[in-house]
Amino acid sequence: MASPHRPKPWTVRFLKWRIRFFGIGAVLGLAGIFLDASWLVTVALVVLLSGVGLRHMLGAGSPDEEDEPEDDAQA
């Protein structure tokens, strides 16, 4: 039997903020395309990249260490 996929706590960290960054960046990008304003598209890209940066900057702690099996049980 397969167990249901449960996201690790560090994968959903600041999820609401990342969604907000995506929404704001998408609206700014579409407005920049519609108004043909390259500076607005650039601002949208900065907002989107800051959302990606938020994930990587705050996820710098090593969450994979918890998944490594311990070798103490074999000794």
Image (cartoon, rainbow, N blue to C red):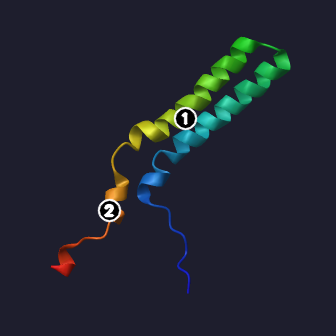
Residue farthest along the left direction in this orientation: 75
Q: Mark 1 — residue? A: 51
Q: Residue at 50% across / 62% down in the picture?
A: 7
State the image coordinates of residue 31 (x, y, percent, origin top left). Answer: 78, 23
State the image coordinates of residue 47 (x, y, percent, origin top left). Answer: 59, 27
| Residue 65 figure quarter | bottom left
Q: Is residue 25 left or right of residue 14?
A: right
State the image coordinates of residue 55 (x, y, percent, origin top left). Answer: 48, 41
Tell me how far mark 1 sits from mark 2, CA to CA: 26 Å
State the image coordinates of residue 16 (x, y, percent, origin top left). Answer: 54, 45
Q: Is residue 31 left or right of residue 23?
A: right
Other-residue count near label 2 (Cα within 10 Å), few / some / many at <14 / 14–19 / ≥20: few
Q: Is residue 18 left or right of residue 59?
A: right
Residue type highlighted by circle 1 = Gly
In what element is the residue under mark 2?
helix
In what element is the residue under mark 1?
helix
Quarter of the image where the C terminus is located: bottom left
Q: Mark 2 — residue? A: 66
Q: Is residue 65 left or right of residue 32?
A: left
Q: Is residue 73 above or below residue 23?
A: below
